[in-house]
Image (cartoon, rainbow, N blue to C red):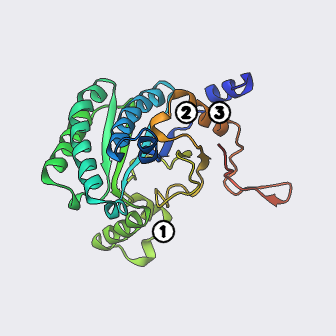
């Protein structure tokens, strides 16, 4: 990273970073290990990245841990993931709480076990008063599901169509407590959003990297932050008579 990029990181830190943590299975396969092992190492990576984001002044980190489509994966992998999440919550809950991290689980909780749901609720209660950084873990989540559940909540609230606008819909989204992501990162070499925070990423800067998630570290994070700092965010504004696109691709 050159001096200009380092300076940019220091002066243009995003409030909210969203990450699709992709590549765990491929990382494990390269090492002749089961896919669940890659997910386990990926959890350790997440804990380190939470700390790195906090140290850089990022206020919100949202990660895509398990999509509503991931239920289609082999049952052995899904079962392993559920057990891993339960173990990870127990292992890291106190550590994250002590570092000022607020944990929030986002998604449809109806399909997970009572034991896992109770563990999530306990982690949320334990960290509810922390303010250093908010970690949102999207589990059994999908961007389209989020829009649908927001619409249902609006209907249940009895609002008339005359009172429904973007602000109202936004207030009923699952992550309404957080500002929209400034920076969207996807690891693993795929170049798509994959149904993560579709509503909220309308004007996010996009950064794609070939780095597999277990290998993602502070240096990779800084590369993404440097790219973000050099972007000219115009949110569709017009400059010199021509519309400007708010996001470009990096990595």
Mark 1 or mark 2, whichever is nearer to me: 2
Q: Nearer the viewer, residue 220 or 93?
A: 220
Residue at 44% over, 60% down: 170
SS for dot 1:
loop
Residue at 43% over, 72% down: 163
- Separation of residues labelled 1 and 3 (CA atoms): 35 Å
Residue at 34% over, 67% down: 149
Left or right placement of residue 162 versus residue 115 in this view: right
Name the residue carrying label 2. Answer: 221
Name the residue carrying label 1. Answer: 165
Q: Nearer the viewer, residue 86 or 235?
A: 86
For residue 59, say whether it is visible.
no
Q: Nearer the viewer, residue 77 or 51?
A: 77
Q: Position of residue 72 (x, y in %)?
A: 33, 64
For residue 54, say whether it is visible.
yes
Name the residue carrying label 3. Answer: 226
For the residues bearing labels 1 and 3, Cβ distance under 8 angstroms: no
Q: Quadrant of residue 173?
A: bottom left
Q: Position of residue 46 (x, y in %)?
A: 40, 35
């Amino acid at each position: 990273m050159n001096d200009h990029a380092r300076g940019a990181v220091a002066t243009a830190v995003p409030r909210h970073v969203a990450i699709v943590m992709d590549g765990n299975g491929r990382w494990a396969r390269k090492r002749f290990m089961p896919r669940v092992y890659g997910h386990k190492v990926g959890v350790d990576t997440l804990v380190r990245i939470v700390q790195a984001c906090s140290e850089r002044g990022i206020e919100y980190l949202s990660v895509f841990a398990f999509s509503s489509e991931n239920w289609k994966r082999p049952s052995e992998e899904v079962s392993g993931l559920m057990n891993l999440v339960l173990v990870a919550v127990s292992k890291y809950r106190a550590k994250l709480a002590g570092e000022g991290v607020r944990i929030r689980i986002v998604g449809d909780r109806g399909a997970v076990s009572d034991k896992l749901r109770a563990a999530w609720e306990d982690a949320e209660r334990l960290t509810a008063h922390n303010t250093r950084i908010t970690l949102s873990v999207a589990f059994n989540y999908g961007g389209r599901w989020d829009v649908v559940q927001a619409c249902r909540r609006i209907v249940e609230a009895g609002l008339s169509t005359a009172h429904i606008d973007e602000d109202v819909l936004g207030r009923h989204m699952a992550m309404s407590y957080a500002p929209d992501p400034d920076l969207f990162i996807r690891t693993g070499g795929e170049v798509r959003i994959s149904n993560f925070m579709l509503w909220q990423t309308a004007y996010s800067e996009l950064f794609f990297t070939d780095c597999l998630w277990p290998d993602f570290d502070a240096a990779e994070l800084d590369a993404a932050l440097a790219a973000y700092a050099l972007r000219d965010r115009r949110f569709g504004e017009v400059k010199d008579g021509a519309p400007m696109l708010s996001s470009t691709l990096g990595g």
